[in-house]
Amino acid sequence: MTLTLQSMRAQVADICTLPVDAIVNAANTSLLGGGGVDGAIHRAAGPDLLKECRTLHGCKTGFAKITQGYRLPAKHVIHAVGPVWHGGRSGEPEALAGCYRHSLDLLAAHQLHSIAFSNISTGVYGYPVELAAHIAVQTVNQWFNEHYDYPLEVIFCCFSDKALKVYNQVLGR
């Protein structure tokens, strides 16, 4: 029997403004900033985020690393490196699910309880939002079912009304 996480929702927002324990950055492998949400998070957090990211020596696709949030309302930034979409036959679904699992593992390891995910890999990396949303929600539900006693609030922070509609459909809302 699969449980559903009660405090899981989607919303359109600027992820840089959310007062949660951790936001998840759709990072590149260098972790040194880039375009889109990655660049916005780095700009909002200030130069100390880049300084800390330099000490992490990058991150592999499908994994995540955590830093402080610095000037952000979020206490931490989890940098998850999603896959570039190549049609779904090059390990993209597994790598994307890994981003969510590893992010939640870091959240729990640091005893944090609220997280906002960006729509990992759906921007310039080209992952179809419909497929990514299913993986995101399924992976978070699966993680929660394995850690059912861990209090957790999850926000899927959407970049558009279209993405919000997709996530709400997947969430059954």
Image (cartoon, rainbow, N blue to C red):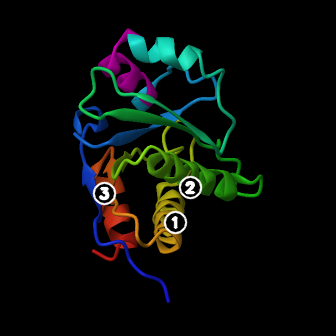
Residue at the (30%, 47%) spot, across then down: 160
Residue type marked 2: Arg
Query: Could you say where residue 116 lies in the image, as x and y percent from the top left?
Result: 35, 47
Position of 165 with respect to 104 (left or right) is left
Query: Could you say where residue 149 lies in the image, as x and y percent from the top left?
Result: 40, 70
Disc 1 target residue: 143
Q: Tell me, for residue 101, which label it has, or none.
A: 2
Residue type marked 1: Trp
Disc 3 target residue: 164
Q: Is residue 149 above or below residue 87?
A: below
Segment tinted magenta in the rendering:
38-47
Query: Could you say where residue 171 lies in the image, as x and y percent from the top left?
Result: 36, 71
Q: Tell me, for residue 111, which label it has, or none.
A: none
Q: Is residue 98 above or below residue 56?
A: below
Q: Are marks 2 and 1 in contact (CB under 8 Å)?
A: yes
Q: Is residue 124 above or below residue 102?
A: above
Residue at the (63%, 43%) spot, across then down: 63
